Amino acid sequence: MRRKIVAGNWKMNKSLAQGLQLFDDIINSPDHQQTNVLTIIAPSFIHLSAVAEKVKTNPNIAVAAQNCHHLSSGAYTGEVSAEMIKSAGAEYVIIGHSERRLYNNETIDLLIQKVNIALKNKLTPIFCIGENSDERHSNKHLEAIKFQLKDTLFHLSAIDFGKLIIAYEPVWAIGTGVTATSHQAQGMHNFIRAEINKKYGKEISEQITILYGGSCNPQNAKELFSCLDVDGGLIGGSSLKATDFISICNSF
Ligand code: 13P
Protein backbone atom coordinates (compact mmCIF):
# COMPACT_ATOMS: atom_id res chain seq x y z
CA MET A 1 0.00 0.00 0.00
CA ARG A 2 1.21 3.50 -0.78
CA ARG A 3 2.22 5.51 2.25
CA LYS A 4 0.36 8.78 2.79
CA ILE A 5 2.63 11.82 2.70
CA VAL A 6 2.16 15.47 3.58
CA ALA A 7 5.09 17.68 2.63
CA GLY A 8 5.45 21.31 3.66
CA ASN A 9 7.32 23.54 1.22
CA TRP A 10 8.31 26.60 3.20
CA LYS A 11 9.70 28.32 0.10
CA MET A 12 11.69 31.49 0.99
CA ASN A 13 10.08 32.01 4.39
CA LYS A 14 11.22 31.98 8.03
CA SER A 15 14.43 33.08 9.68
CA LEU A 16 16.49 30.30 11.27
CA ALA A 17 14.90 30.90 14.69
CA GLN A 18 11.37 31.13 13.27
CA GLY A 19 11.83 27.97 11.22
CA LEU A 20 13.11 25.96 14.16
CA GLN A 21 10.22 27.22 16.26
CA LEU A 22 7.69 26.23 13.60
CA PHE A 23 9.32 22.84 13.27
CA ASP A 24 9.19 22.27 17.04
CA ASP A 25 5.56 23.40 17.13
CA ILE A 26 4.72 20.78 14.50
CA ILE A 27 6.64 17.80 15.80
CA ASN A 28 5.93 18.36 19.48
CA SER A 29 2.21 18.90 19.09
CA PRO A 30 0.08 16.13 20.63
CA ASP A 31 -2.12 16.47 17.52
CA HIS A 32 0.77 15.44 15.28
CA GLN A 33 1.49 11.93 16.43
CA GLN A 34 -0.01 9.86 13.62
CA THR A 35 2.17 7.09 12.30
CA ASN A 36 0.27 6.32 9.11
CA VAL A 37 1.38 9.59 7.50
CA LEU A 38 4.92 10.56 6.60
CA THR A 39 5.50 14.27 7.20
CA ILE A 40 8.22 15.88 5.12
CA ILE A 41 9.41 19.40 5.82
CA ALA A 42 11.21 21.35 3.10
CA PRO A 43 12.75 24.41 4.74
CA SER A 44 15.39 26.63 3.20
CA PHE A 45 18.95 25.34 2.97
CA ILE A 46 19.96 27.21 6.11
CA HIS A 47 17.59 25.13 8.26
CA LEU A 48 18.46 21.73 6.83
CA SER A 49 21.04 20.33 9.20
CA ALA A 50 19.44 21.74 12.37
CA VAL A 51 16.05 20.35 11.41
CA ALA A 52 17.46 17.01 10.22
CA GLU A 53 19.21 16.60 13.57
CA LYS A 54 15.82 16.81 15.32
CA VAL A 55 14.17 14.11 13.18
CA LYS A 56 16.98 11.57 13.29
CA THR A 57 15.10 9.16 15.51
CA ASN A 58 11.59 9.78 14.21
CA PRO A 59 10.58 7.47 11.33
CA ASN A 60 7.46 9.55 10.60
CA ILE A 61 9.19 12.83 9.80
CA ALA A 62 11.80 13.59 7.18
CA VAL A 63 13.49 16.59 5.67
CA ALA A 64 13.69 17.78 2.08
CA ALA A 65 15.67 20.44 0.30
CA GLN A 66 13.77 22.70 -2.06
CA ASN A 67 16.32 22.44 -4.84
CA CYS A 68 19.74 21.07 -5.71
CA HIS A 69 22.37 21.93 -8.27
CA HIS A 70 22.57 19.79 -11.40
CA LEU A 71 26.32 19.15 -11.16
CA SER A 72 28.23 17.33 -8.48
CA SER A 73 30.67 20.04 -7.33
CA GLY A 74 32.91 22.84 -8.51
CA ALA A 75 33.18 26.58 -8.96
CA TYR A 76 29.47 27.46 -8.80
CA THR A 77 29.30 30.25 -6.26
CA GLY A 78 26.17 30.26 -4.13
CA GLU A 79 24.97 26.82 -5.22
CA VAL A 80 24.25 23.70 -3.15
CA SER A 81 24.93 20.19 -4.40
CA ALA A 82 22.92 17.01 -3.88
CA GLU A 83 25.86 15.55 -1.97
CA MET A 84 25.86 18.52 0.43
CA ILE A 85 22.12 18.14 0.99
CA LYS A 86 22.47 14.45 1.72
CA SER A 87 25.34 15.14 4.10
CA ALA A 88 23.15 17.64 5.99
CA GLY A 89 20.72 14.83 6.77
CA ALA A 90 17.98 15.40 4.20
CA GLU A 91 16.47 12.39 2.42
CA TYR A 92 14.35 14.20 -0.16
CA VAL A 93 14.70 17.05 -2.63
CA ILE A 94 12.01 18.99 -4.49
CA ILE A 95 12.87 19.24 -8.18
CA GLY A 96 11.04 20.98 -11.02
CA HIS A 97 8.87 23.30 -8.95
CA SER A 98 7.06 25.70 -11.29
CA GLU A 99 8.50 28.70 -9.41
CA ARG A 100 12.02 27.51 -10.19
CA ARG A 101 11.10 26.73 -13.80
CA LEU A 102 9.73 30.27 -14.11
CA TYR A 103 12.08 32.45 -12.04
CA ASN A 104 15.29 30.46 -12.53
CA ASN A 105 14.72 29.36 -16.11
CA GLU A 106 15.01 25.69 -15.25
CA THR A 107 14.84 23.80 -18.51
CA ILE A 108 14.03 20.19 -19.26
CA ASP A 109 17.72 19.38 -19.77
CA LEU A 110 18.61 20.85 -16.41
CA LEU A 111 15.80 19.03 -14.63
CA ILE A 112 16.91 15.70 -16.09
CA GLN A 113 20.39 16.32 -14.70
CA LYS A 114 18.98 17.29 -11.31
CA VAL A 115 16.88 14.13 -11.07
CA ASN A 116 19.88 12.02 -12.05
CA ILE A 117 22.26 13.63 -9.58
CA ALA A 118 19.71 13.46 -6.75
CA LEU A 119 19.20 9.73 -7.31
CA LYS A 120 22.93 9.18 -7.57
CA ASN A 121 23.28 10.73 -4.10
CA LYS A 122 20.43 8.62 -2.71
CA LEU A 123 18.04 11.55 -2.34
CA THR A 124 14.41 10.92 -3.25
CA PRO A 125 13.22 13.52 -5.77
CA ILE A 126 9.79 15.01 -5.18
CA PHE A 127 9.29 15.92 -8.81
CA CYS A 128 6.74 18.62 -9.62
CA ILE A 129 4.67 18.68 -12.77
CA GLY A 130 1.65 20.80 -13.62
CA GLU A 131 -0.11 22.59 -16.43
CA ASN A 132 -0.54 26.35 -16.63
CA SER A 133 -3.89 28.07 -16.86
CA ASP A 134 -3.78 28.46 -20.67
CA GLU A 135 -3.21 24.75 -21.05
CA ARG A 136 -6.08 23.97 -18.69
CA HIS A 137 -8.47 26.39 -20.41
CA SER A 138 -7.62 25.15 -23.89
CA ASN A 139 -8.12 21.57 -22.74
CA LYS A 140 -4.45 20.75 -23.33
CA HIS A 141 -3.71 19.89 -19.70
CA LEU A 142 -3.47 16.14 -20.20
CA GLU A 143 -1.17 16.54 -23.15
CA ALA A 144 1.01 19.02 -21.21
CA ILE A 145 1.43 16.60 -18.32
CA LYS A 146 2.08 13.68 -20.63
CA PHE A 147 4.97 15.59 -22.21
CA GLN A 148 6.37 16.75 -18.86
CA LEU A 149 6.48 13.16 -17.65
CA LYS A 150 7.95 11.82 -20.85
CA ASP A 151 10.51 14.61 -21.35
CA THR A 152 11.88 14.82 -17.82
CA LEU A 153 11.35 11.42 -16.18
CA PHE A 154 10.78 8.62 -18.66
CA HIS A 155 14.50 8.28 -19.39
CA LEU A 156 14.83 6.61 -15.96
CA SER A 157 15.11 2.88 -15.46
CA ALA A 158 12.11 1.23 -13.81
CA ILE A 159 14.11 0.81 -10.61
CA ASP A 160 15.00 4.50 -10.45
CA PHE A 161 11.55 5.68 -11.51
CA GLY A 162 10.06 3.63 -8.68
CA LYS A 163 12.04 5.71 -6.18
CA LEU A 164 10.35 9.00 -7.13
CA ILE A 165 7.53 10.93 -5.56
CA ILE A 166 5.47 12.88 -8.09
CA ALA A 167 3.77 16.13 -7.09
CA TYR A 168 0.96 17.31 -9.36
CA GLU A 169 0.88 21.08 -8.91
CA PRO A 170 -1.33 22.89 -11.41
CA VAL A 171 0.42 26.25 -11.85
CA TRP A 172 -2.91 28.12 -11.74
CA ALA A 173 -3.59 26.75 -8.26
CA ILE A 174 -0.26 27.63 -6.63
CA GLY A 175 -0.59 30.49 -4.17
CA THR A 176 -3.79 31.68 -5.83
CA GLY A 177 -6.40 30.37 -3.40
CA VAL A 178 -7.96 28.55 -6.36
CA THR A 179 -7.70 24.84 -5.62
CA ALA A 180 -8.26 22.09 -8.15
CA THR A 181 -11.57 20.42 -7.42
CA SER A 182 -11.34 16.87 -6.17
CA HIS A 183 -12.72 15.82 -9.54
CA GLN A 184 -9.93 17.67 -11.38
CA ALA A 185 -7.25 16.35 -9.02
CA GLN A 186 -8.43 12.76 -9.17
CA GLY A 187 -8.77 12.97 -12.97
CA MET A 188 -5.18 14.13 -13.37
CA HIS A 189 -3.69 11.80 -10.77
CA ASN A 190 -5.43 8.88 -12.42
CA PHE A 191 -4.11 10.02 -15.81
CA ILE A 192 -0.55 10.30 -14.44
CA ARG A 193 -0.79 6.80 -12.99
CA ALA A 194 -2.10 5.47 -16.29
CA GLU A 195 0.81 7.04 -18.20
CA ILE A 196 3.26 5.49 -15.73
CA ASN A 197 1.50 2.15 -16.14
CA LYS A 198 1.94 2.35 -19.93
CA LYS A 199 5.65 3.05 -19.59
CA TYR A 200 6.69 1.05 -16.49
CA GLY A 201 3.84 -1.39 -15.81
CA LYS A 202 1.19 -1.88 -13.18
CA GLU A 203 3.37 -2.66 -10.22
CA ILE A 204 5.33 0.59 -10.39
CA SER A 205 2.31 2.72 -11.29
CA GLU A 206 0.40 1.36 -8.30
CA GLN A 207 3.30 1.86 -5.93
CA ILE A 208 4.27 5.42 -6.88
CA THR A 209 3.17 8.22 -4.55
CA ILE A 210 1.43 11.15 -6.27
CA LEU A 211 0.88 14.28 -4.17
CA TYR A 212 -1.43 17.18 -4.94
CA GLY A 213 -0.18 20.75 -4.49
CA GLY A 214 -1.84 24.12 -5.04
CA SER A 215 -3.82 26.09 -2.44
CA CYS A 216 -4.38 22.98 -0.36
CA ASN A 217 -5.57 24.06 3.10
CA PRO A 218 -7.26 22.66 6.23
CA GLN A 219 -10.68 23.24 4.65
CA ASN A 220 -10.16 21.34 1.40
CA ALA A 221 -7.50 18.74 2.30
CA LYS A 222 -9.94 16.06 3.44
CA GLU A 223 -11.87 16.06 0.20
CA LEU A 224 -8.72 16.10 -1.93
CA PHE A 225 -7.04 13.33 0.08
CA SER A 226 -10.13 11.15 -0.12
CA CYS A 227 -9.53 10.74 -3.88
CA LEU A 228 -8.34 7.28 -4.80
CA ASP A 229 -5.17 8.39 -6.58
CA VAL A 230 -4.26 11.35 -4.35
CA ASP A 231 -1.71 10.11 -1.81
CA GLY A 232 -1.28 13.36 0.08
CA GLY A 233 -0.18 16.92 -0.51
CA LEU A 234 2.67 19.31 -1.16
CA ILE A 235 1.68 22.34 0.85
CA GLY A 236 2.96 25.91 0.48
CA GLY A 237 1.20 28.72 2.35
CA SER A 238 -0.63 26.46 4.79
CA SER A 239 2.60 24.79 5.88
CA LEU A 240 3.79 28.02 7.52
CA LYS A 241 1.35 27.82 10.43
CA ALA A 242 1.71 24.78 12.67
CA THR A 243 -2.01 24.33 13.43
CA ASP A 244 -2.98 24.53 9.75
CA PHE A 245 -0.25 22.15 8.67
CA ILE A 246 -1.06 19.63 11.42
CA SER A 247 -4.72 19.80 10.48
CA ILE A 248 -3.77 18.92 6.89
CA CYS A 249 -1.60 16.03 8.13
CA ASN A 250 -4.70 14.76 9.95
CA SER A 251 -6.93 14.95 6.89
CA PHE A 252 -6.80 11.33 5.75
P1 13P B 1 0.44 26.88 -2.04
O1 13P B 1 -0.03 25.78 -1.13
O2 13P B 1 0.83 28.13 -1.33
O3 13P B 1 -0.54 27.12 -3.16
O4 13P B 1 1.79 26.37 -2.73
C1 13P B 1 1.83 25.09 -3.25
C2 13P B 1 3.22 24.78 -3.63
O5 13P B 1 3.79 25.42 -4.49
C3 13P B 1 3.91 23.72 -2.89
O6 13P B 1 5.11 23.39 -3.50
Image: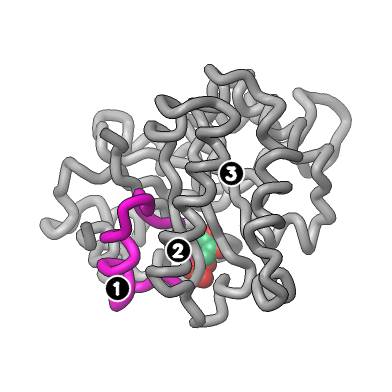
Separation of residues labelled 2 and 3 (CA atoms): 17 Å
Residue 223 against residue 106 in the figure, above or below: below
Circle 1: residue type: Pro
- Do the residues bearing badges 2 and 3 touch, measured as CB atoms within 8 Å? no
Q: Residue 185 carries which label?
A: 2
- Dividing the image into 4 quarters, which one contains the C terminus? bottom left
Region rendered in magenta? 215-236
Q: Earlier in the sequence, mark 1 or mark 3?
A: 3
Q: Does the magenta stretch include residue 46?
A: no
Residue 14 visible in the shown view: no
Q: Residue 218 carries which label?
A: 1
Q: Residue 127 carries which label?
A: 3
For discs 2 and 3, the disc positioned in front in the rendered view: 2
Q: What element carries label 1?
A: loop
92 vs 140, left or right, is left
Q: Residue 128 carries which label?
A: none
Q: Position of residue 38 (x, y in %)?
A: 30, 42
Q: What element carries label 3?
A: strand
**Does mark 2 have its CB less than 8 Å from ligand 1?**
no
Residue at x 34%, y 65% (from the top left corner): 224
Separation of residues labelled 2 and 1 (CA atoms): 16 Å
Separation of residues labelled 1 and 3 (CA atoms): 23 Å
206 vs 199, left or right, is left
Residue 87 against residue 131 in the figure, above or below: above
- The image quadrant of residue 8 is bottom left
Q: Position of residue 181 (x, y in %)?
A: 42, 74
